[in-house]
Image (cartoon, rainbow, N blue to C red):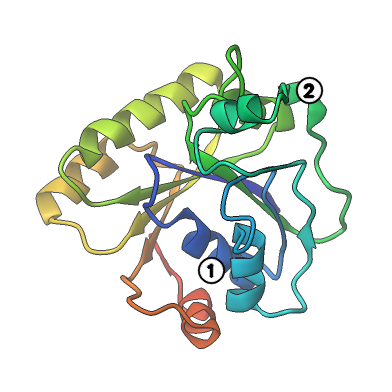
Amino acid sequence: MKLFITGIGTEIGKTVCSAILTQHFKADYWKPIQSGDLHNTDSMKIKDWVGSGVVCHPETYRLQLAASPHQSAAEEGIQIRVDDFQLPETSNSLIVEGAGGLMVPVSDNELMIDLIEKLRLPVVLVVRNYLGCINHTLLSIMALKEKGLLLEYLILNGEFPPDTERIILNYTNKKTKIIRVPDVDFITKEKIELIANNLQNG
């Protein structure tokens, strides 16, 4: 099982959901691009939340500036190319976490969705409720469909009004598995493990 986790925007819980799926599938974890927060990277968070035994493969790019990867790379005189990335070798399941959403630029000419296409991985789309989330979710689903990418899981992260959830699911392929993740105020290893062991699918 290898999955690429993306979201409909930033700060919608991709790393928390990555931790939950890493725990659930007993998987390795890989963050191809870390932009900023090098003192507290997403890989470090995964180790805190899943346990020090989890294998976190090294990032291909570790960039200083907390910004879009293309901007962070430009600050350091680096040109990111999708062809630079290779999936880590592992016999375990693998959770790959992207930066931001599908249309985040990794360079002036390539986007995060191009990286997913290059890696040829099924996608997990993380959705959180806010004004505009329906629009962002449906646009993300359309973009994946246009590229011929498989939306394996859609994660509803937190509480959703029934009217919002209904529209989102109406436009989600019936073969896509739905995961519901509860709101987590203070994240701990124990809470991640509990959610991972009791994932709500359907």
Q: Earlier in the sequence, mark 2 or mark 1?
A: 1
* Disc 2 packing (10 Å; few <14; some 14–19; many ≥20): few
Residue 107 sits in which quadrant? top right
Total labels: the figure holds: 2
One can see residue 112 in this view: no
Q: Which residue is mark 1?
A: 20
Q: Is residue 4 above or below residue 76?
A: below
Question: Which quadrant of the structure image shows residue 32?
Answer: top right
Along the viewing direction, whichever of 166 and 20 lies nearer the viewer: 20
Q: Which mark lies nearer to you, 2 or 1?
A: 2
Distance from label 2 to label 1 (Cα)? 29 Å
Quick check: can you spot residue 146?
Answer: yes
Q: Identify which residue is drawn at 63% across, 62% down.
A: 39
Quadrant placement of the C terminus: bottom left
Q: Position of residue 38 (x, y in %)?
A: 64, 56
Residue ranking furthest to the top: 109
Q: Is residue 197 left or right of residue 10?
A: right
Residue indicated by mark 2:
83
From what the image shows, is residue 139 above or below residue 54?
Answer: above
Residue 42 spot, x, y in % from top left? 60, 59
Q: Residue furthest bottom?
A: 190
Kind of residue at disc 1: Ile
Q: Is residue 85 left or right of residue 164?
A: right
Answer few, some or many: residues within 10 Å of disc 1's Cα (few below 14, many 20 plus, some between 14 and 19): many
In the rendered image, residue 80, in percent from the top left (x then y), is placed at 71, 25
